[in-house]
Amino acid sequence: MTETTSKTRKYQVEIVETLRRVVTVEVPDTPNSDNMAIAEISRLYREEEIVLDSGDYVCTSFNIVNDKTKTE
């Protein structure tokens, strides 16, 4: 009689969800305007005046982190 064994392997799978929104901000026209615009949007985001939601969904990816555990 042949005994059947079922081998399994455990994986850690990373789920990455990407949200994206383009936001317009007005800052003084100076040589540092790019940095000022990013700083202002960053502040608004940190203070939760800009909150990304499901309407900003772009994609989801799944990645194997490791597969080092084999079990029987």
Image (cartoon, rainbow, N blue to C red):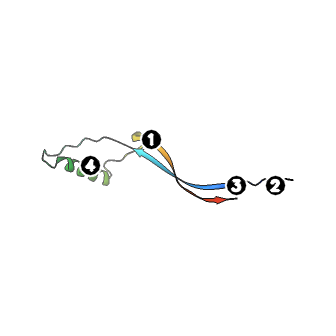
Question: Mark 4 or mark 2, which has the lower sequence index?
Answer: 2
State the residue position of label 2.
3
Say which of marks 1 and 4 sits in front: 1
Marks 2/3: CA–CA distance? 13 Å
- Cα distance in 3D space between marks 1 and 4: 23 Å
Task: Tell me the SS state at disc 4.
Answer: helix
Q: Around disc 3, counting alpha carbons within 10 Å, would you say few (fewer than 14), some (14 to 19), or many (20 or more)?
A: few
Query: Residue 37 in the image: x percent, y percent?
Result: 22, 47
> Hey, what amino acid is under mark 3?
Lys
Given the image, on which type of amino acid does mark 2 rest?
Glu
- Within 10 Å of the Cα at label 4, are there few (<14), some (14-19), or many (20+) other Cα atoms? some
Q: Is residue 64 left or right of residue 42?
A: right
Does the CB distance between marks 2 and 3 fall below 8 Å?
Answer: no
In this view, which residue lies farthest toward the left? 30
Residue contact between numbered discs 4 and 3, judged by CB atoms under 8 Å: no
Residue 59: x and y in percent read 44, 41
Q: Which residue is mark 1?
A: 59
Residue marked by disc 3: 7
Specify the amino acid type for callout 4.
Ile
